[in-house]
Image (cartoon, rainbow, N blue to C red):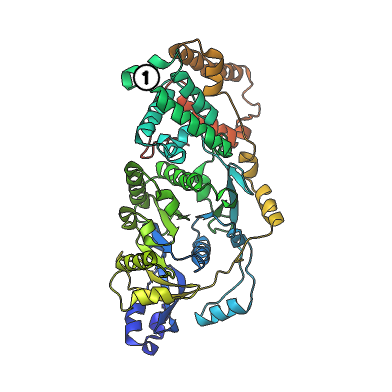
């Protein structure tokens, strides 16, 4: 029986009414103990029902109020319940989730205050890095699968330029010109503005020299900032994020972003690609006993800054629909106003840390934040400016899907290390991962750049015919070899199909013989795996 019921008689009446809203009968994550009238009431526990974690959420608060520790606390409990978790580590201090925490006076005092049985525990984790910049297994995407909408956001193109980029992708898909890395895209743009290629898009709008010039200059500037490493093969298979450890605990996937934190548009958009890619591949599951994955989207305001209406509409639709595929998304930012209203309306679980009200803009943000909460027994304006580190105002969805009462909460302490692990320990964990050999080494196979460079004088249809022959030739050779091979010979296929290179080749095979790719809300490629 939940603790709030066991000691209900000891609670003041307003606190009892709040606590009863969190007395869930099924599995739930423990956030902490109720705060009422400045007093911590450990018999009134504040919790989130596990099945409601796919109804999305928001973790907000000023810098230094404990948002990262809240992520760590929730991620630990999800992992313990067998739910995989994805964490974007902007500051480089989440890697400690893989190591047992350090018992000290502060931890012991917090555990005693909230009646937490604190046990130092490390959790199974994989560490990733965009393009291998930083410590982690490299995460790459091909330009084709990233798609024109997300790429336009990264390159900061306007609407007209974004539409032209979409036209370029359309042409490349039709002609079997694989866009694997940025030089492939540059080669196709250059071809379409050359004497040989100008006529190719004439009947469907064309590509102006001025627009092509903007796209090429943006690509050049993008590469000059060291961004080229993020695009290429082997492409990361996002289903790796859905794994569990051998002991049944969910794998915590930590994307180390400290090395690229000065490139916010890139990593925020790349996170959206990860989410969109998962959206394409996962089947509908409806309401499940627990999520398939919970995805924490840190520094969320960076995703929305300067975004077009079409881009925001796509984010809203993705967030709305991915719930039915068992994926929960938590946006992490400073104030709710950083998140567009249509997206905010999809976030059923809220953990709001302290806000500051030092300036008129701060005061306006505070009032706006208060309006986003249900009616409350608290004076939220006063409460939100007076919360201490590791305290928050919470409202979540109950097991029936209704909002719980607003509860000021003193949060539990994470049981894993609250800080980064040693660089040597992190490097050892990365290199010992079974995924390291699959993704560590970049591959640069023949694609649009190589196919266009030596064949500039040839027409695209002729190139497409030649490329189709090239694709079919290995299959014919393999078929002939199989016919000559004794049936009882050991096959090497099983040794090959597990490699990242093979998977990346297989995912892009459909583009090689001139078949256009079906694209999603974000223009990212739909692929079968």
85 above or below 144? Answer: below
172 above or below 249? Answer: above
According to the picture, the residue beneath numbered tag 1 turns out to be 201
Foreground residue, 499 or 365?
Answer: 365
Give coordinates of residue 525: x percent, y percent: 42, 34
Give coordinates of residue 294: x percent, y percent: 45, 56
At a point 43% along the width and 21% down the height, the residue shown is 514
Query: In which quadrant of the rendered view does residue 117 lie?
Result: bottom right
Count of numbered circles on the image: 1
Query: In which quadrant of the rendered view does residue 17 lie?
Result: bottom left
**Which residue sits furthest left?**
375
**Which residue sits furthest bottom?**
10
42 above or below 268? Answer: below
Foreground residue, 116 or 223?
Answer: 223
Q: Quadrant of the N terminus?
A: bottom left
At a point 56% along the width and 51% down the height, the residue shown is 257
Give coordinates of residue 383: x percent, y percent: 39, 76
The answer to whether any part of residue 497 appears in the image is: no
Density class for disc 1 (Cα within 10 Å; few <14, some 14-19, many ≥20) is some
Foreground residue, 258 or 213?
Answer: 213
At a point 34% along the width and 61% down the height, the residue shown is 348
Give coordinates of residue 475: x percent, y percent: 54, 20
């Amino acid at each position: 029986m939940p603790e709030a019921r066991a000691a209900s008689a000891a609670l003041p009446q307003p606190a009892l009414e709040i606590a009863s809203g969190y007395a869930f009968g099924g599995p739930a994550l423990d956030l902490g103990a109720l705060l009422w009238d400045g007093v911590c009431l450990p018999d009134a526990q504040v919790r989130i029902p596990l099945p409601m974690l796919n109804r999305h959420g928001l973790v907000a608060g000023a810098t230094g109020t404990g948002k990262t520790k809240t992520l760590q606390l929730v991620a630990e409990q999800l992992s313990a319940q067998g739910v995989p978790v994805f964490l974007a580590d902007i500051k480089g201090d989440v890697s400690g989730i893989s190591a047992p925490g350090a018992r000290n006076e502060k931890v012991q005092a917090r555990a005693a205050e909230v009646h937490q049985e604190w046990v130092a525990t490390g959790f199974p984790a994989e560490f990733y890095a965009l393009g291998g910049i930083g410590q982690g297994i490299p995460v790459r995407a091909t330009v084709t699968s990233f798609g024109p909408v997300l790429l336009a956001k990264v390159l900061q193109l306007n609407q007209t330029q974004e539409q032209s980029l979409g036209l370029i992708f359309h042409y490349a898909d039709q002609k079997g010109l694989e866009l694997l890395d940025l030089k492939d895209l540059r080669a196709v743009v250059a071809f379409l503005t050359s004497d040989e290629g100008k006529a190719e898009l004439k009947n469907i709008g064309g590509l102006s020299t001025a627009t092509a010039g903007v796209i090429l200059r943006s690509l050049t500037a993008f590469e000059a900032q060291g961004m080229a490493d993020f695009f290429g093969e082997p492409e990361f298979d996002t289903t790796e994020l859905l794994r569990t450890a051998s002991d049944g605990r969910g794998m915590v996937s930590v994307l180390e972003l400290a090395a690229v934190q000065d490139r916010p548009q890139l990593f925020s958009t790349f996170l959206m690609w990860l989410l969109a890619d998962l959206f394409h591949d996962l089947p509908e599951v409806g309401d499940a006993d627990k999520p398939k994955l919970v995805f924490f989207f840190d520094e969320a305001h960076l995703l929305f800054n300067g975004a077009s209406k079409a881009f925001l509409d796509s984010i809203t639709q993705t967030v709305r629909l991915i719930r039915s595929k068992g994926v929960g998304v938590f946006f992490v930012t400073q104030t709710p106003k950083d998140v567009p209203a249509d997206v905010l309306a999809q976030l059923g679980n809220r953990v709001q840390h302290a806000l500051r009200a030092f300036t008129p803009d701060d005061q306006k943000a505070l009032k706006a934040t208060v309006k986003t909460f249900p009616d409350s027994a608290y004076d939220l304006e006063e409460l939100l400016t007076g919360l201490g580190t590791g305290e928050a105002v919470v409202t979540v969805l109950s097991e029936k899907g209704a909002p719980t009462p607003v509860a000021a909460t003193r949060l539990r302490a994470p049981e894993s290390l609250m800080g980064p692990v040693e660089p040597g320990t992190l490097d050892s964990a990365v290199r010992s991962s079974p995924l390291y050999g699959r993704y560590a080494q970049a591959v640069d196979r023949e694609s649009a750049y190589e196919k266009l460079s030596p064949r500039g004088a040839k027409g695209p249809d002729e190139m497409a015919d030649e490329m189709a022959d090239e694709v079919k030739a290995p299959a014919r050779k393999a078929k002939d070899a199989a016919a000559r091979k004794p049936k009882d010979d050991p096959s090497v296929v099983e040794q090959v199909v597990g490699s990242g290179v093979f998977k990346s080749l297989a995912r892009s095979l459909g583009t090689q013989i001139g078949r256009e790719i079906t694209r999603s809300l974000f223009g990212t490629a739909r692929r079968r795996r």
